[in-house]
Image (cartoon, rainbow, N blue to C red):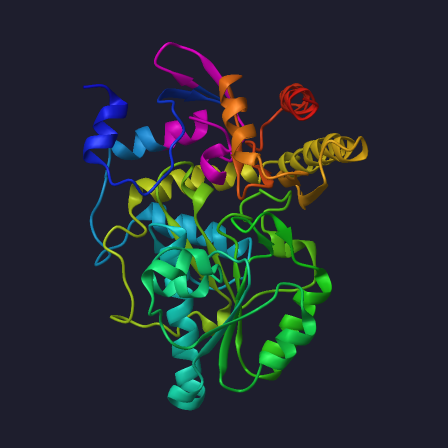
Amino acid sequence: MDIFKKYDRYVMPTYARQPVAFVRGKGCYLYDGEGNAYLDFVSGLSVNNLGHCHPAVVKAIREQAGELLHTCNLYFTEPGAELARLISENSLGGKVFFANSGAEANECAIKLARKCGRDLAGGGKHRIITLTGGFHGRTMATLTATAQPEKQAPFRPLLPGFSHVPANDIVALAEAMDDSVCAVMLEPVQGEGGVHVLTPEFLQVARELTQKHKALLVFDEVQTGLGRTGRLFAYQYGNVMPDVMTLAKSLGGALPIGAAVAAPAYSDVLTAGMHGSTFGGGPLPCAAGVAVLKELMAPEFMENVRRIGNYMRAELDGLAGSGLVESVRGLGLMLAVDLHRPHAAEIVSRALEQRIILNNTSEKTLRFLPPLIVEERMIDEVVEFLKTTLNV
């Protein structure tokens, strides 16, 4: 029985998988069982930000795997301590909770916000506002926070206490805010929603309103964080500092790990027994995370991400200028184009035939998440494919 038949027989059909099986990865390429190389512009949905099997990450994993794989969170280990230090000192300055995924990190942020609200005003301060088109996970709480009705519909009734306002709508946000709100939760760039960038003005107003109503401002940087937008964290583009930030995806260099980091004022809200994760913060993914952050913080790394991101944006803007695509948007190497007609899935399939891995977030939107080590020649190859395909 081949791999496709095994998946069909034994794996729940929760993903619409592309008809290819990969056996190896290196840098910006994946390889199938016949040795064919595929140029990867999805990066495991922004998990492989350093490319596949980055030597520093592989080395850290191998060394840690030979020493200690797991204890439990009743004890201390050096990799967890060091990764928490690196995250804290390069972001909000407070303490970190480790989980296994972005959804779990967001669950922590939601519980922390609810606990803060209860500490301030009892059960009445519990509402959480999120944005239409956002995506925060697929657990029941994070699904409720995800204001995409088509994803929520099969699982209603959802959890109470959540409300949604349109992204970048300052008036709607102001009208939704009152003293019953314990948090506003948002992505600086909406990823699964189609790479929609929140304006600096909207973020600033969100900061002002949350301070006025004694609510937390939570930034979901699961996809935008760790270099994807050309900064270590997307909030660094403006003058808006969140109270809580969540991370995952590329944090472990391809191993599963998530993190919620709180500013110092909120670092001790959750105490012993209030939250936990059996595997969260284990020595193996944390050792990989330390290697990832050291690479990202190397001199000129982020400067090069911004440079190559500007190059790709200019090339995609050229497609819009020639009328091949409707619009272009994004930050750094988190980019998208809207097509003139709803055939994005077809474009993704045709790209795979040409051994280029692309992704669509809707029938009109192509999303580009190449490894941060991508080269201009690789971008040229993808843009040339788009020119040829969209001209037909």
Viewer-closest of 87 and 7: 7
The residue at the point 67 percent across, 24 percent down is 383
Q: Is residue 65 visible?
A: yes
| Residue 44 placement (x, y as % from top left) | 45, 35
| Residue 187 placement (x, y as % from top left) | 55, 57
Viewer-closest of 198 and 340: 340
The residue at the point 50 percent across, 39 percent down is 46
Q: Is residue 28 visible?
A: no
Is 290 situated above or below 390? below
| Residue 120 placement (x, y as % from top left) | 45, 87
Q: Quadrant of residue 122?
A: bottom left
Location of the C terminus by quadrant is top right
Q: Residue furthest right?
A: 321
Q: In the rendered structure, does residue 42 fall within the stretch colored magenta?
A: yes
For this view, does 154 lie left or right of residue 109?
A: left
The residue at the point 34 percent across, 14 percent down is 33
Q: In the rendered structure, does residue 93 fall within the stretch colored magenta?
A: no
Is 96 situated above or below 301? below
What's the magenta region? 31-60
Location of the N terminus by quadrant is top left
Viewer-closest of 235 and 15: 15
